[in-house]
Image: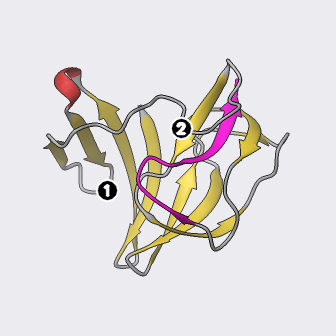
Amino acid sequence: MQYFKVTVNGKAYEVSVEELSGGDVNFTAAQTGASVVNTAPPVSSAPVAQGISSGEEVVPAPLGGSIMEIKVKPGDQVKKGQVLLTLEALKMENEIVAPENGTVGQIFVQPKDSVNTGDALLTLRN
């Protein structure tokens, strides 16, 4: 399960994403309690960047957009839910948060970089 904080029309939502059997993805928005099942093909969880060590988990871009700000650096200790970077998509700022506690490994993006859904943003080590 991965957790994201998404701001829509000025309202912040805590969103959890869980992959279900059969490739479906379950999205749950905490503020509304609504749950929607998306039957689109899942984004591969396989490493998409070169040089990823075992024990490192890739944090992928949840949607396409431009990197606005990177709030961590390699070696930083982060807690689950801590903001790692900000991504602009559809003229909205989206905070990408740590899915779990860990240490920042590699960072694959820089401010102003364009990313697509599923692109590797950085890695976390447990």
Q: Position of residue 69 (x, y in %)?
A: 68, 69
Instruction: Tell me the number on the disc at residue 101.
Output: none
Residues tagged 1 and 2 counted as in contact (Cβ below 8 A): no
On the image, numbered disc 1 is attached to which residue? 31
Q: Earlier in the sequence, mark 1 or mark 2?
A: 1
On the image, numbered disc 2 is attached to which residue? 48
Q: Which residues are magenta?
A: 114-126
Amino acid at circle 2: Val
Q: Residues within 10 Å of mark 1 (few under 14, many from 20)?
A: few
Side of 57 where 115 appears, left or right: left
SS of the residue under disc 2: loop
- Determine the CA span between mark 1 and mark 2: 32 Å
Question: Of circles 1 and 2, which is in front?
Answer: 2
Q: Quadrant of the N terminus?
A: top left
Question: In the rendered picture of this protein, how many numbered marks are placed on residues?
Answer: 2
Residue drawn at point x = 37 percent, y = 42 percent: 16
Foreground residue among 118 and 89: 118
Q: Position of residue 37 (x, y in %)?
A: 15, 41
Residue drawn at point x = 41 percent, y = 53 percent: 117
- Residue 108 against residue 7 in the figure, above or below: above
Side of 104 where 80 appears, left or right: left
Q: Quadrant of the C terminus?
A: top right
How would you classify the magenta stretch by its main secondary structure? strand
Q: Position of residue 113 (x, y in %)?
A: 61, 68
Residue drawn at point x = 60 percent, y = 39 percent: 49
